[in-house]
Amino acid sequence: MRVLMFGWEFPPHISGGLGTACFGMTQALARRGAEIIFVLPRIDDSKGRGEFLRLRSASGTPITEDLIQRMDWAQQEVWRNGIRCLPVDSPLMPYLTPQDYVGALGRLSGRACAEAPYCLAQRQAGEEEFRQSQTFTYSLQGGYGPSLMDEVLRYSRLSAALAVQEDFDVIHAHDWMTYPAGMLAKTLTGKPLVVHIHATEYDRSGSDINEQVAGIERAGMLAADVVVAVSRLTRRTVVERYGIPPEKVMVVHNAVARHEAQRHYPIPPRIRHEKRVLFLGRVTFQKGPEYFMEAARLVLQKIPNVRFFMAGSGDMLPRLIRRAGQLRMGSRFHFAGFLQGEEVDRMFALSDLYVMPSVSEPFGITPLEAMLYDVPVLLSRQSGVSEVLDHALKADFWDTRDMADKICAVLRYPCLAAELVKNCREEMKSIRWENAADQLLAIYHNVHGGRQ
């Protein structure tokens, strides 16, 4: 089975769980014999990568005059399916801090708007080169910059240009940034399309959604042969909010890979007598950091000798730093900033409890990563990962008193913590990327066989 996979993140170019999930998933698929061509917006060749798949950079892919004409027709078909690409006069970047937002606004005057079916400004800039060589291209920056929608549109055309060059059986697109690419590649090649929804716009934004992003999500899922949701929770959102036929939506839970990081980190002597509770994730509404802080306040009233750590960055960080000062928790509540690599491993290993109080979490890999270090976890019931962890502690994100009581119980009773670790360790044996790979391969074979 040869898979053309479109993704926005892949290690070492990651900013969250999407890249981590793509890595574990593709590694397991490769072990099952799948050949994977993974198309990123841009690849930094100076970074080392695994050899189990072929990474390709969309940026710089040449597009010929004949292909342009085919793309123009194909994109008209794609847009007819429901995508409306409007000029964007504000920075489309998830989780901007106020300072980043001001900076992004200052750059708008020098940025061309994105126009359907592709960025006309980019095409005009390449006209002279096009006349001389009969080909032109776009350059992509990747990431989640202020011109994200421009990048999505350019990526779709460059990725489609790669698609007509490659030999593959099925297209697999991850999250909304790659759905236009998947739809365009499907229209040009006739190959079946699988779209993977790792998080919806309703998860990221609550009721204040970006209609353009939600429209792309809906169009991509309607155009797909199969929609893969990371949890039953996400599947319900896809069916109820986006109107996708239930029989078209399959659930494939995420997992975690046993990595090669050093499993043992000595606890510094100065903090050995204290208990440590960790929040690690984006400091945004979706992840519920304010509920974690409120639970910490209640815990410290009962157990003063506890340190709480909030690791991550996001738009709510300045407000929460001020709130910690107002609550006079500064000596017990620490902000660790954005962590990566071994810093994350160390933070997990030194924690006595990991808390994920998400308001809306399609899945959530971080509790599984914490469990690799035998750290007990407390999960929001509003998370997909709670579907696969029967023995983890759970609380509603809004019930901070219940959350605080369960934190206190774990910290006060070592036998309870040990029992939670033991039970979760057993559950972890079945939460493997190989299981997810088997399900995905069955989906690939089904859609590919249906097209033959």
Image: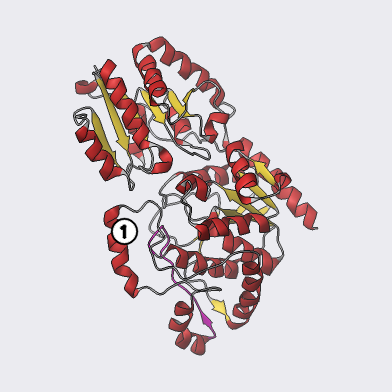
Say left or right for 408 vs 250. Answer: left
Q: Nearer the viewer, residue 35 or 435?
A: 435
**Residue 198 in the image: x percent, y percent?**
54, 46
Residue 138 belongs to the span the image colors magenta: yes
Disc 1: which residue: 101
Task: Identify the element where label 1 is drawn.
Answer: helix
Say left or right for 267 vs 448. Answer: left
**Residue 1 in the image: x percent, y percent?**
69, 51
> At 64% across and 67% down in the image, what residue appears?
78
Amino acid carrying label 1: it is Tyr
The dominant secondary structure in magenta is: loop
Residue 187 in sight: yes
Residue 394 belongs to the span the image colors magenta: no
Where 25 falls versus 70 (above or below)?
Answer: above
> At 51% across and 36% down in the image, what residue appears?
257
Quarter location, residue 252: top right
Which range of residues does the magenta coloring cover?
134-146
Say left or right for 399 vs 176. Answer: left
Quarter location, residue 237: top right
**Residue 366 in the image: x percent, y percent?**
44, 35
Labels in figure, total? 1
Q: Nearer the viewer, residue 294 or 225?
A: 294
